[in-house]
Image: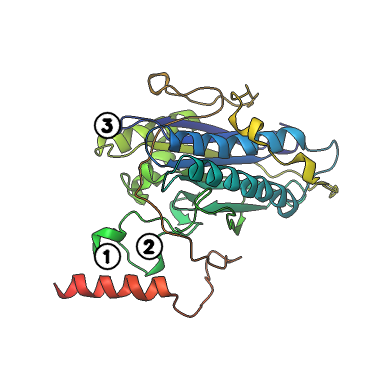
Amino acid sequence: MGAFSHLKCAAASDIGRKRKNNEDSFGVFPEAGFFCVADGMGGGDDGEVASAATVRAIEDFTASHPQPDNAGYSAERYADGICRALVVTSGWIYDRTQEKHLKGCGSTFVGVCFDPTRPAEALALHAGDSRLYRIRGRSIQRITRDHSAAELIGAKDEDDINPMFRGMILRAVGIQPVVDVERTPVQVKFGDKLVICSDGLYRMVPEKKIVSILRAAETPDDAVKTLIDAANEAGGIDNVTAVLVEVGELPQPLPVAELKIETSEEPTRETLTAEPKTCETGDPVTRDTDTGSGAIFGEVGVAKPDEPESPGQDGSKDPEKKPESAPSIWTRILGWFASRKKKD
């Protein structure tokens, strides 16, 4: 894996116990130092199309921008290209939704980009409620914050807000012509484990149990399989997808190479709807053959209600400190419903 030979990875997905179709996709691109999960929304095959198109756009970008020999692209610059691909994909999904007279179609996205020029740093990219966790020793830290109604008003449990707002996603690929991808820097060191997952995992498996599973597992593949099994044993009410990246001894930093991103390289409609390509992933990628998963995509499903237009939020560079801002109209509306529920 060249600049990223210190990373070990595994990925798996499962349809769960309740869903009838598969709407998640995951991407594992170790040669590029990029790993991601996309959680489709929309029902039928529309969520599957949205999540697959989202991951396919990343596949095409990483394939067309391989890391150079004896140098590397900074995570920030590489993320510029990833985000541009996601913006184009968001427009394509949005246009497709309008053409088919649908509502609520799109895909969450969460990914982590490792930096060969600064091996102790990585960059999380996300939109929606799929998450990135960092496990260090016996502690676990959620790196990303959900772009959801519950998170917006500070509710610890969705049961604390009005039912009409439960499961509401405020930012995702495809629900608007342009998606605002939040970036969060992540410090990494030897022994860290990063878990990228859809809500089908963290809603079923408590954080403490995630830590215990990872600490007990002998290999990344064993860890991911056990996480999926734990979600299903807890009820499996949603589809579940997980990507695990284990950080080995950090390599020496590489010189920074210039990354040129041409507009003509953006994904096209034909690219996004093409059959998935086979991708050489280095470490094994776990797939569940019973769910129809194929190529590099673990296609399982998550059904969510229709989304409203995204009010937009400014991302934070520090996962420990989130920016303070004046309450938006969504904050006031959701807060009002939450207070009424408590009074009732």
Where is mark 3, residue-wise?
Answer: 17
Where is mark 1, residue-wise?
Answer: 161
Q: Residues within 10 Å of mark 3 (few under 14, many from 20)?
A: some
Position of the N terminus, as image quadrant, is: top right
The Cα atoms of the two marked residues, 1 and 3, are separated by 26 Å
Residue type highlighted by circle 1: Ile
Whether tag 2 and tag 3 are in contact, CB under 8 A, the answer is no
The Cα atoms of the two marked residues, 2 and 3, are separated by 26 Å
In the image, taking residue 38 as reference, residue 159 lies left or right, namely left
Residue type highlighted by circle 2: Ala
Q: Position of residue 261 (x, y in %)?
A: 80, 46
In front: 67, or 216? 67
Q: Position of residue 339 (x, y in %)?
A: 24, 75
Residue type highlighted by circle 3: Arg
Within the image, what quadrant is residue 343 found in?
Answer: bottom left
In the rendering, which numbered label is found on residue 149? 2
